[in-house]
Amino acid sequence: QVQLVESGGGLVQPGGSLRLSCAASGISVSLYDMRWYRQAPGKEREMVAGISRNNDNIEYADSVKGRFTISRDNAKNTAYLQMDRLKPEDTAVYYCYASLIHEFWGLGTVVTVSS
């Protein structure tokens, strides 16, 4: 059974940082394209960052370029999203996503950016 479990969300002040983790079981993250999505209240889910399975293609939403960094640790079978210089508009539920032939989603972790 495949599971993606996000962690690392929480409440942070504007300008602060958080690192989200996506721990995978049942799949090897090294073999999958990994992405982070987010969904803010009342808005559509949007792709935030993605990394291809051979790491040769990394992409970011324009709204987070230069502030967020996606990575993976194959030994820990975990993907990460480092979020710096957070803004109130980054407040959302953040989801981990893995795709190869099949697609898998985590249940999400809540990030709130507020003073």
Image (cartoon, rainbow, N blue to C red):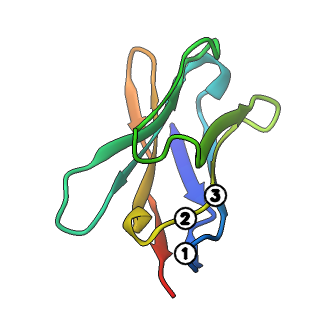
Under circle 1, the secondary element is: loop
- Residues at marks 1 and 3, CA–CA distance in whole angstroms: 10 Å
State the CA–CA distance, disc 2 to disc 3: 5 Å
Residue at image location 79% in from the left, 38% down from the top: 76
- Amino acid type, mark 2: Leu
- Would you name the residue on which mark 3 appears? 84
**Residue at 67% in and 35% down:** 71
| Residue 86: numbered disc | 2
Asked whether disc 2 touches disc 3, contact meaning CB atoms under 8 Å apart, the reply is yes
Q: Residue at the location (40% across, 47% down)?
A: 63
Secondary element at tag 2? loop
- Please say if the residues under marks 1 and 2 sit with CB atoms less than 8 Å apart: yes
Q: Earlier in the sequence, mark 1 or mark 3?
A: 1
> Where residue 98 appears, x then y in whole percent?
47, 31
Mark sitting on residue 98:
none
Q: Nearer the viewer, residue 89 or 71?
A: 89
- Residue 89 in picture, x, y percent from top left: 37, 66
Q: Confirm whether residue 28 shows in the render.
A: no
Is disc 3 surrounded by few (<14), some (14 to 19) or many (20+) residues within 10 Å?
some
Q: Amino acid at mark 1?
A: Pro
**Picture residue at 59% right of the left edge, 33% below the top:** 26
Q: Which residue is identified by label 1?
A: 14
Q: Residue furthest right?
A: 75
The answer to whether residue 43 is left or right of residue 8 is left
User: Along the polypeptide, which appears first: circle 1 or circle 2?
Assistant: 1
Q: Residue 31, percent across and down? A: 61, 17
What is the secondary structure assignment of the residue under circle 3?
A: loop
The amino acid beneath tag 3 is Asp
Q: Position of residue 57 (x, y in %)?
A: 55, 15
Quarter of the image for residue 56 reads top right
Tell me the crowding category of disc 2: few under 14, some 14 to 19, or many 20 or more residues within 10 angstroms, Cα based. Answer: many
Q: Bin the neighbour count of mark 1 within 10 Å (Cα to Cα): few under 14, some 14-19, many 20 and up.
A: some
